[in-house]
Amino acid sequence: MSPCIEYAPGLHVCRSAGTTRAVPGRRRKRWWCFACRKRLLHTRMMFEPKQPSYYGPNFWWECPSCGEENVLFPGREWVDDE
């Protein structure tokens, strides 16, 4: 069973079970963390679902201080190149 979180009455978000780990062979990169207000060496992280998933693995840069991805200016999002 997937872990589900109820955000509002009748609104549940379910995530597939999986593992989170650092991307092997990927160098760490120095980014500005807008949450910590520091320039720190971030690690490229990956979430791999255990079951086959439509979305596949997810990637992000993780701050060593706060443990989250806050490398973009607030309100901005990553844009995929096509």
Image (tube, rainbow, N blue to C red):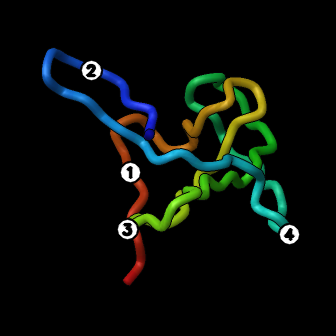
Q: Which dot, 3 or 1, sits closer to the camera?
A: 3
Q: Quadrant of the C terminus?
A: bottom left
Above or below, comparing residue 50 to residue 18 in the picture: below
Q: Secondary structure at mark 3?
A: loop
Which comes before the other along the chain, label 1 or label 4? 4
Is 75 on the left-hand or right-hand side of 27? left
The residue beneath circle 3 is 54
Report, in whole angstroms, how far the alpha carbon at label 3 lies from the one at label 2: 23 Å
Q: Residues within 10 Å of mark 3 (few under 14, many from 20)?
A: few
What residue is at 57 percent from the left and 42 percent from the top? 71
Kindly indicate whether the residue at mark 2 contacts the one at mark 3 (C-beta within 8 angstroms): no
Above or below, comparing residue 9 to residue 49 in the picture: above
Which comes before the other along the chain, label 4 or label 3? 4
Q: Position of residue 38 (x, y in %)?
A: 71, 29
- Disc number placed over residue 77 in the picture, else none: 1
The residue beneath circle 4 is 25
Type of residue at label 2? Answer: Tyr
Q: Residues within 10 Å of mark 1 (few under 14, many from 20)?
A: few
